[in-house]
Amino acid sequence: MKKFFRSLLAKYMLIIVLALSIVQIAYMFIVILITEVADNIESAYTSDEMDYEQIEENWHKDANMLKTEGDISEHFAKWKDQYPDASMFWVDQSGTLRKTTEERDNLPTEWTSAFTAKFIKERYGENPFTVIAFVGEKDTNGFVVFEINREVFQPPFQTAFDQYSSWLFFGTLFLVLFFIFVSFLFFRGIRKRLLQLQEAMEIRDVDELPIQVHVKKQDEIGQLEKTFNQMVFELRESKKREQEEEQLRRELIANLSHDLRTPLTKMNAQTFKIAKEEVSDEAKQAIYALESSVEDIDKLVENLMSYTLLMASKYKLDLQEVDIVRFVRESIATWYPVFEKEGFEINVELAPLHDKMWHVDPIWLGRILDNLLQNVLRHAHQGRYVELRTESTESYDAIVIQDQGNGMKETSNTAGAGIGLSIVDMMVKGIQLDWEIQSSNNGTTIRIKKNR
């Protein structure tokens, strides 16, 4: 039950109940106020004096008893004394306005039958209340008219209601606007907290994980915030475990790489010693294959070590201004004997580039070229062709390495190309260059590009 009262549903239901209660209380307050005001209003007339039928009957009765002009004056004075708010006038048999209780601009001096009929039609059942009676028993002395505003006869409650009707309207409007305002604050608070949670999901901490939020309330959004914080906590713990496992893996690879180097060195020394002995041709081929295998394993271990260092961001980077054409020429010169030994046709066309000096790490760039040329030697051996050239366009300068092998889609008997190309990719991006590979059954072309 305590959890329910903390919920957003309970809070909004409370707003609804308060709104309905305030409306009812306000209604009762208005009724009491109007009743009190009505009780304090003193009416100038009794209930009998405010009876329209009784007034009409008495007016006709008194008019029948009138004979002379003096009688009419006394009659007007008597009714004026009883009804101070009323007005009366007399029109004689010739249609002349003879007497009025007060000056009236809207009454003509001469009354025609048409005007009289129009006057009677307009006043019938309208405001002011009007009674028309003929003078005398023979109806030969014209007619007298009694007029009084119907509002004078309103009950005190109606008078009080009319007096405070504007207050009632503005009070109702205020309650409606107050309910809308409270609802607006309620939903704005919900929206604000949801936006804060969304912002926390989008913001990343130094470890690239979302940040936790401060839980202020124990409602549904508060429970959502708690769940989000729990998720962030579990992500941090998971990443911490992953980093620990990654660290153990790197240490294991580093130790294995170091430990493998020792037996490989011994194997290389023993094969070199055996190669000096007088052995058969088959033994020489076996020794050559063993030396190649040892060399391949050594390269793989070196690549594995480099890959681990790059992943751990511990491979030292030293950017310098390098004359790229000269650097590439010196690098390929060291590979000439290797390719010639394997029977490769070597084509080198190093034309000047638009941007002669490249801001790179010479060790990293040398390792990139070595890995790519080693890849050609291992996986494009059947083509026995390698080309190294420069290329310059409007958008970039590039170093191009091309072979005539079966392409990268062809399965190779020599393993290790995947990690070698991964090292190339990380190093190229590390020295802020781009690269692309185009491979088909007719060969592979690799461009190392510097965009302008």
Image (cartoon, rainbow, N blue to C red):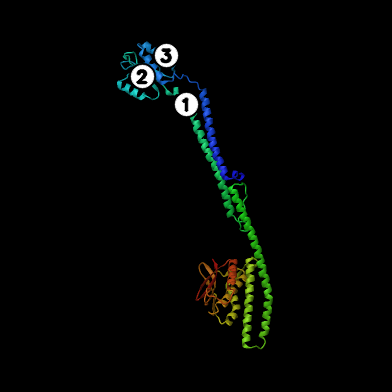
Mark 3 nearby-residue class (10 Å; few <14, some 14–19, many ≥20):
few
Counting residues from the N terminus, which is met first, the one under dot 2 or under dot 3? 3
The circle on residue 78 is 3
The circle on residue 132 is 2
Measure the C-alpha gap from mark 2 to mark 3.
17 Å
Q: Position of residue 233 (x, y in %)?
A: 63, 56
Q: Position of residue 33 (x, y in %)?
A: 53, 28
Tell me which residue sits at (60%, 48%) in the image: 222
Left or right: residue 349 versus residue 140 is right
Measure the C-alpha gap from mark 1 to mark 2.
28 Å
Q: Which residue is mark 1?
A: 158
Q: Quadrant of the C terminus?
A: bottom right
Tell me which residue sits at (60%, 49%) in the image: 223
Q: Which one is nearer the viewer's eye here, 314 or 264?
A: 264
Q: Is residue 276 above or below residue 40?
A: below
Mark 2 nearby-residue class (10 Å; few <14, some 14–19, many ≥20):
some
Q: Callout 2: helix, strand or loop?
A: strand
Q: Callout 3: helix, strand or loop?
A: helix
Q: For the residue marked with disc 2, what is the amino acid?
A: Ile
Tell me which residue sits at (55%, 41%) in the image: 13
> Does the CB distance between marks 1 and 3 fall below 8 Å?
no
Measure the C-alpha gap from mark 1 to mark 3.
29 Å
